[in-house]
Image (cartoon, rainbow, N blue to C red):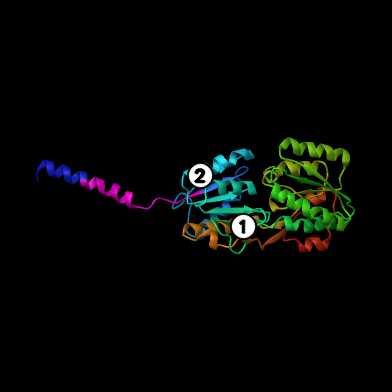
Amino acid sequence: MHRREFITLLGGAAAWPLAARAQQPAMPVVGFLGGVSPTDTTRAFRQGLRETGYVEGENVAIEYRWAENQRDRLPALAADLARRKVRVILAMEGDDVVLAAKSATATIPIFFLTSSDPVSRGLVASIARPGGNVTGINFVSAELVGKRLEILRELVPAAVRVAVVVNPATPGATEATLRDVHPAAQALGLQIEVFNANTSQEIDSAFTKFATQRPDALFVANSAFLTSRRIQLVHLATRHAIPAVYHGRHYVDVGGLMSYGANLLDAWRQSGVYMGRILKGAKPADLPVIQSSKFELVINHQTARTLGLTVPPALLARADEVIE
């Protein structure tokens, strides 16, 4: 064999692996758009993806974009994901996140997680047939407002004045909470006073007012920002000795008194499963919005004792989990 032929043969052999790699399909990319900051719920999301055969870093990539509670950044972050031509966008932590994604693209599938009514908020056409490029999970958190107040009254039967902390930056969830909390409170003989909080300083300010106004109990509304500040909220509630009820167990896990709401970890796992179906070709228009069906009552018995509260045996018996 001549030297030139030998070199040509080597060059062709070296090119085979490159050609083979070039023919392999590109790894699909999921765009993750959040209104606040990273949370531990993303582990449950990745678990759901694994159940459909997708593992981050192996056969799927995830591009994370967090607004860090600067809501005006959402349109630019959503547009960036759309420019990168991700296969699907997961929009969480507020209806404004979903609307930003919808404004950025009418073709890339969008999956949302919301606690407000997705139809009235204009996210989908209907629950059964979402239409367009959007579907998701509804935590139905707002509809549970009355139930949370009932449980709070059961634990603190002498309560009359209840402070309600809401985040005005998430109007959908806040409006739903305020719509339901007033009639529920009236039916229970409770007086409601609403406090807005969209920064850590505003949370501190609310509790400074509690120190002089002395509400009998506290109701913290569903909000991605408030959830991100749950350690601050729980610490202040304990320091001011105010019994509080929350919408999710992640508050109770860090010392909060009690929560009643959707099982968020299960909802996040379901979102991963739906995401896997979309990656495999399912169309959002054909995927009904999931309505959360798993709800849990979690009580931190240790916090109750710290606050000098005796949890009624009937309430303990109904609890899905009691943290000692």
Residue 159 falls left or right of residue 275: right
Q: Residues within 10 Å of mark 2 (few under 14, many from 20)?
A: many
Residue 89 falls left or right of residue 24: right
> In the rendered image, is residue 301 in sight?
no
The quarter of the picture where residue 226 lies is top right
Residue at image coords 13%, 44%: 5
Q: Report if the CB atoms under discs 1 and 2 are less than 8 Å apart.
A: no
Q: Nearer the viewer, residue 203 or 297?
A: 203
What secondary structure prevails in the magenta region? helix
The quarter of the picture where residue 234 lies is top right
Q: Residues within 10 Å of mark 1 (few under 14, many from 20)?
A: many
Residue lying at the far left in this picture: please name it: 2
The image's mark for residue 81 is 2
Q: Nearer the viewer, residue 185 or 229?
A: 185
Mark 1 vs mark 2, CA separation in Å = 21 Å
- Where residue 29 appears, x then y in whole percent? 47, 49
Please tell me whether mark 2 sits on a helix, a strand or a loop.
helix
Residue 2 falls left or right of residue 176: left
> In the rendered image, is residue 86 in sight?
yes
Question: Which quadrant would the C terminus be assigned to in this image?
Answer: bottom right
* Residues shaded magenta: 12-30
- Where residue 23 appears, x then y in whole percent? 32, 52
- Where residue 160 appears, x then y in whole percent? 89, 51
- Where residue 7 appears, x then y in whole percent? 16, 42
**Residue type marked 1:** Ile
**Residue type marked 2:** Leu
Residue labelled with disc 1: 137
Task: Note whether 145 is above or below 7 in the view shown.
Answer: below
Asked if residue 205 is among those painted magenta in the image, a careful observer would answer no
Residue at image coords 82%, 36%: 208
Task: Note whether 230 is above or below 135 in the view shown.
Answer: above
